[in-house]
Amino acid sequence: MTTLLLTLLAISAAHAQSITASLSGSVLDPQDSAVAEAKLTLHDPAKGLTRETLTGPTGAFVFTQLAPATYHLTVEKPGFAPARLDALTLNANDQRSVRITLQLATRGETLAVTAEAPLVRESPAVATTVDRRFIENLPLNGRSFQTLINLSPGVVITAASLPENGQFSVNGQRTGSNYFTVDGVSANFGLPFATSPYEGAGGGTPSFSASGGTSALASVDAVQEFTIQTSTYAPEYGRQPGAQVAIVTRSGTNQIHGSLFHYLRNDKLDANSWFGNFNNIKRPALRQNDFGFTAGGPVFRNRTFFFASYEGLRLRQPVISPVVRVPSLEARANATGLLKSILEAYPLPVAAPLPDAPLETPYVAGYSNPATLNATSLRLDHSLTNRFQIFGRYNYAPSETRERGRYATPSFIAVLPAKTETLTTGATMLLSNSLNNELRFNWSRAAAAQTYIQDTFGGAKLLSLPSLIAPTADPATSLYYLSIGGNDENTITPGTFSNNTQRQINFTDTLSWNRGAHALKFGADFRRLTPSFGGRFFSNSLTAPTITSLITNGVASGTTSQVAGYLRPSYQNFSLFAQDAFRATARLTLTYGLRWEVNPAPSGDDASLPGVVQGLANPATATLAPRGTPFYQTTYNNFAPRIGVAYRPFQSNTVIRAGLGLFYDLGYGFAGTALTPT
């Protein structure tokens, strides 16, 4: 075992989590005795690929590293009538078994075909698989499959926020503990739009679109299936202890196929909201146009295939603003200089001044926030031989939302552009009938920025940003922030908040070895994240208790800050695992093994890492450590043993599953907050 593991590491740094499936089972005669040396042929009719193996002395067989698809299985043995099982559907991460009984051959008997085979899932994991047919038959809100994740046991949808944008919790864990993969490589390289990277700094959350959807990773029409495992999963799954969400993208087949779609919503078909009617506000515009296409087929029949997809979104989402306060007309008329310019940047009043604050008036309005998405992907699959297949996929998905009144008065608009770009290649190598290897490489880049611009909404007048910042500062990388009483709806904030970028390199590999009733797997993982945080090099932050106080007394307090450039820390993650799926009996499968996680503290240059204090056990003598000192010492004993049981007490498909194990998280949590550039 040690020799095999070292050999794997010599091939490449790699990853344990596989997106393939395995099919095992036994071949028996009419007296339920084992049939040895029976020939099994597994055929994928969509791509023309074929795999063969022989049963062992106990009649057992195993096919591993199978791409998710629908297969035909043919069984042949001299003296017995050949048999074929059709419609064997295998999903990503499936661990399925089948029991095949051969009948004695008689004169003139032909192939016996079974339309549906009784497949049994022998994995101990609590898992939910959603395939393409299920996705196509459901109306998905926003054409993103996040709502389908809620179908899995233990999942609770949570409200997304700046510090926590993981969107759902599993079994009470943090929202940043879930691990997403696309085609077997990490998709957890997302970044928030905030100045602080929070849990996005070290790869805690996936790269969503600007609207928070999964279309940035893979458009719904480009998804073959996805599987979410929530507990008792095998050692090959890890890095984070929450849900393991595996997305598999579609590939081409020998048949040319394609689709066109256009989903439409319009406010002409909808009623006004209760808040709009209550405030006597006309219904804001609602426009949703979600359109695109898919196309797939052969380049060379039975050998090379392509699949392309595009999805475009043009959305205008209606909003009725909360009731906020703006300066009265009298206050604007009596102000002079810079104060007058600031007061006139608010929308004009729509009601009489407040009795308790004559210089302030309430304000409410209706408007529509626009959003766009352009997600394009291209995948190529090629079979060098029946034993060696390779693929490559490129995905480019820029998106943007514009939110009026986001933590600001309604005359200011937050422009939130995002971009996800991924390139994934992989190879599946059948080294022998019992030994095969699955290799993956991924390069990804994500960008998320937040800039505030102003318009004349509600009769507001434009502020001049250069007049609000230092003469030496660049307006393109500066921010003016005037907070009124901590109430975000009263804030004046033109300028740049953030311009963050995340880059990922991920090597992945899994080696499978079948030996009798044992299906052994060995894997390793290397991931490197190199984010860049910043974009705001000058900021002028001011506060006032109320608008009235601002008018009568001026700004109460303020700070000015300036930074030299971006912060560029680095994160590295290593993992190794070894596991065995042992079919102890025809009804009992044990899955057990060991995983090892190493997650060093963030590294980087002296300018990118904050100061570290030493000797906090005695605060009186604590000292500042030298620049570049790691936040904490790396832990090398994060060993995670696991064992799971899948037992079928009856001949039916009823399966009892149980398991226990140790799981580790990345350990970064909100350490990214310490990297805030300003």
Image (cartoon, rainbow, N blue to C red):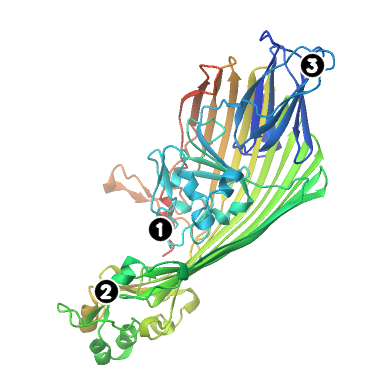
Q: Residue placed at 64% from the left, 43% from the top?
A: 507
Disc 1 residue crowd, few under 14, some 14–19, many 20+, Cα 10 Å? some
Q: Quadrant of the C terminus?
A: bottom left
Residue 634 sits above or below residue 289 on the image: above
Residues marked 2 and 3 touching at CB (< 8 Å)? no
Residue 72 sits above or below residue 628 on the image: above
Q: Is residue 311 visible?
A: no
Residue type pointed to by label 1: Leu
From the top left corner, tell me how far across and down residue 222 is, in percent: 63, 51
Task: Of the two numbered discs 2 and 3 on the same chain, state the one appearing first in sequence.
Answer: 3
Q: CA distance from mark 3 to mark 1?
A: 62 Å
Residue at numbered disc 3: 77
95 vs 278, left or right, is right
From the top left corner, tell me how far across and down residue 624 is, in percent: 37, 52
Residue farthest toward the left in the current orientation of the protein? 356
Give the mark toward the camera: 2 or 3: 3
> Residue 254 sits in which quadrant?
top right
Q: CA distance from mark 2 to mark 1?
A: 26 Å
Secondary structure of the residue carrying numbered label 3: loop
Residue at numbered disc 2: 557
Residue at numbered disc 1: 162
